[in-house]
Amino acid sequence: MKIKIIRSLHFVLVLQLLHIPFIVSYGFRNCIQNAFQNSSFTCIQRFIQNTNQAVSDLPDFTEYLNISYNNIINLKEYTFSHLHKLVHLEFTNNNLKTVEDGAFVNLTNLNLLNMSYNQISYLTSGVFNGLVSLNVLILEQNLLASIGNDIFKQSGNLVLLNLRSNKLASFGTVVQSVAHLEKLKELDLCNNALTSLNHSLTISLPNSLTKIHLCNNLLNDVDCRENFFENVRVLDLSYNNITNGSSLGYINLRNVTLLQIRKNNLDVFQFLNVSKIKPQSVDYSGLGLYSSENVTQVCQYIKHQPIKKLSLQHNDISNLRRNMLSHCSQISSLDLSHNIIKRIHCLEFLEQNTELEDLIIEHNRLNTLKTCNNTRRLSKLVNISLSFNRILSVQNNAFSYAPYLKLLQLNINNIAFLNKQAFSGLDYLSLLRLDNNLITDLFSTSFAKLSHLKILNLRNNRISIIFSQTFKDLRNLQTLDLGGNKIRSLTKASFFGLYNLRKLYLDRNYIKHISAEIFGHINSTLGVLDLQGNQIHYISSTIELSPFKYLSNLYDLKLQGQQPYGINIIPRHYFKGLKALHDLSLSENKLSLSEDVFEDLDNLQFLSLADACNGIHSFIPGIFKNLRNLKILSLENVGLNAIKPEVFGNLTNLIKLMLLKNDIRSINVSVFENLTSLKYIDLRKCPLSCTCSNKKLKQWLNQSQVQVVYLYDYPCADNNSEPFHSFDTHVCNSRLGEFLFFGTSTVILLCMVFPIIYKKYYWYLKYTFYIFRSWFNNQWRKQDNNVYKYDAFISYNSHDENWVFQELVHNLESQDPPSFKLCLHHRDFELGKDIIDNIVDSIYNSRKTICVISRYYLRSEWCSLEIQLASYRLFEQLQDIVILIFLENIPNRELSVYQRMRKVMLKKTYINWPSEPEEQKLFWTKVKDALGTGSSTIEESQNALIV
């Protein structure tokens, strides 16, 4: 505990430094922690296949754990080793087949282990090692065929061992395994496959063992040694095949106080003749007595000995003869249930049994309870149960033979008529059960003079009206149950006389209206009022109505499930006067709630509005403002789409909040800042969205103070395959809106400007890019600037190809010296190299660039690019490196659109191709003169570099 407190203080300090609210959350993958007992956990019906799925995230202070109704096949070693404080472990209704040695190691405080209803067929000798404090072990309903001799060697504190409903066949091995358990008091071996009680003569049962259950086995005989059961007080041998009374009589049963041997086809009288047991210690149920004569014979064995309870169940007894129990005059309790008795004759068969206190005749065929005047009084008879019969009517003075009767049970019969004086004379009756009958009318004399009655149960009858002063004599009645009837209306005299009534159940009737006057006679004492499942309905919230204004001590009010559509609207100040109300249930109503609906409930601790859905909505701010003492709030399936701080702000004592099955997609964690006592919240089946609006909620859910039920099961509403607790929040930013605005604005602006730029400046940009590339490449060539591979790079259009090859190449490469080395596209470009790189390299590897200009040339994009790159070199190096040859006369107005061309023409002289042959010789002289030195000079320069 000290460590836990220190951890909590460290945690709070970190929260303060980070400015995070104190109320944070945690959850378990497959378990729910009890909100009011933090050491108790349930992991039921979670489809768990591996125990670690349940216990791996449980805290080490766990004391009570239930992992029932799952699908765990194997319990492995050290499964619960970190739960060293575990006291109670339930592991029922799994498909458990094997339990490894050491599965319960370190559970030194475990008191109870229940592994019933599994498929365990074998347990090794070390399976229960470490369970030194184990008191109760339940292995009922498994497949165990044998038990190891030393399986309980470390469980010396075992008090109860339940091995019922297995397949154990050897009684000796069981005895050997429990012989050393000096504190064992009860051993249950019913419903196994035991055929014999034979065992080692050297091994005895523990002296502490007082109860042994061997029912529903295959025993044909009781073949153990004589004193084997000498310390046993309760022995159950029912439902076996024991037929020999002599063998049973051989056993020493002197100390047995209850022997059950029903359904053994045993001659009970033969057994009583030879047995050493006290006859009054035998349960005579199911022994085939059939007639009252046989019952009388049984009593002759008892011979007026005091007997606490005489049980004669399942004997097919039909008639109760007068004084048939006269020899059993000292009976305290008589049970004649499960026979075929039709009449009890005013208990004439008990006239001699003046000590009788309890009479039970359930599950028989009684049909009428007749008048019993002038019969002998059984002054000690205080309890009569005639439930589960076929009683149609109860006549006057039907129980006058028991004037001091306190408990009378007539439930689950067919009683349609109660005589006005049916219970006359029962002045001391405190409990009367008439539920589940066919009673239609109650009269003012029906319960006359039952002044000591405290509990009256009339549930599930056909009562339609409560007449005035029906209960006027029941001044001490504390509980009145009228649920499940057909009551349509109540008046101010319906409960007249019930001055001490504390609990009133009127549920599942047809009541439409209630008023303060109805409860006027019970206002000072009533604590529980159940009105669920009626037809209470209001159409306006403007009226002021308070039917409970005088019920100042009422602490539990149930109004859920009004039919057919619910209460709908709650009038103003409807709950006025309920100063002591702790629990209020308004679930299963289609409610529209006003802001002040709960303002009079200052002491309310539990409020349920579950399934009160009236469409998708959110609560009005301040609706819970006065519920400062509320501890549990159930808002399951109420159609909520948001929870706001102003709605839950004042619930400072709230411990448990259930919000499951609502349309909540995002939650502002500031809601929980004022819920300083919150320990439990359920958000299952809410479509929480994995968006930035839930970033803080996701962080809050992964902290550690408030339990979030099955936290790791919540999926993202927009992606069921992604868990909510781990969705990616890195994209979320507090300035995300600004980033999105500037980002989208920039994108939109670019999308608007780009088409314009593309249309007007496409080639300009393209040229700029290539020029930059050429400049960049030129930086690497500066060291080789004086060495050229070609005399000239020829830039021309494919339409002028014939002139280039027939005239230009012929005159410059093939004629008399000086001859020139020319660079041509088709001949000198490097294969596989990018065309732009080829152009740039060719321009920079040539002393000159000759541009053969024609109208086709001017229209060509590639030619335009070549002259652009050449002109760039011209303007950069300020050298005479560009020669323009015009093949046709192009007016200046056509050249004006080619700005780069015009710049070159302004800087350099250009040469026109003449049409006259005589002028062509002069043309080639000008070209050669412009080219300057021929290829011989290039070769000399290259040779010089090589040397």
Image (cartoon, grey):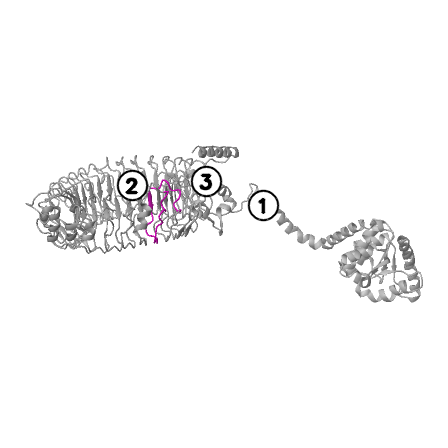
Identity of the residue furthest to the front in this view: 202
Which of the 4 image quarters holds residue 377? top left
Residue 156 percent location from the top left of the image: 34, 41
Q: Disc 1 and disc 3: Cα gap in Å? A: 32 Å
Residue 530 percent location from the top left of the image: 27, 43
Q: Disc 2 and disc 3: Cα gap in Å? A: 32 Å
Residue 194 percent location from the top left of the image: 28, 54
What residue is drawn where x is 57% and y is 43%? 736
Instruction: Tell me the residue that label 3 is attached to.
Output: 25
- Closest to the camera, between mark 1 and mark 2, is 2
- Magenta segment includes 900: no
N-term mark: 1 or 3: 3
Location of residue 202 with respect to 864 vertically, above or below: above
Identity of the residue furthest to the left in this view: 374
Q: Amino acid at mark 1?
A: Leu
Location of residue 812 with respect to 222 vertically, above or below: below
In the image, taking residue 731 as reference, residue 660 lies left or right, namely left
Q: Is residue 719 visible?
A: no
Which is more toward the observer, 166 or 447?
166
Instruction: Tell me the residue that label 2 is attached to.
Output: 557
N-term mark: 1 or 2: 2
The tag on residue 447 is: none
Q: Amino acid at mark 2?
A: Leu
Disc 1 secondary structure class: helix
In the image, taking residue 930 as reference, residue 437 lies left or right, namely left
Instruction: Tell me the residue that label 1 is attached to.
Output: 740
N-term mark: 2 or 3: 3
- Magenta segment includes 142: yes
Q: Amino acid at mark 3?
A: Ser
- Closest to the camera, between mark 1 and mark 3, is 3
Q: Disc 1 and disc 2: Cα gap in Å? A: 54 Å
Magenta residues? 126-154
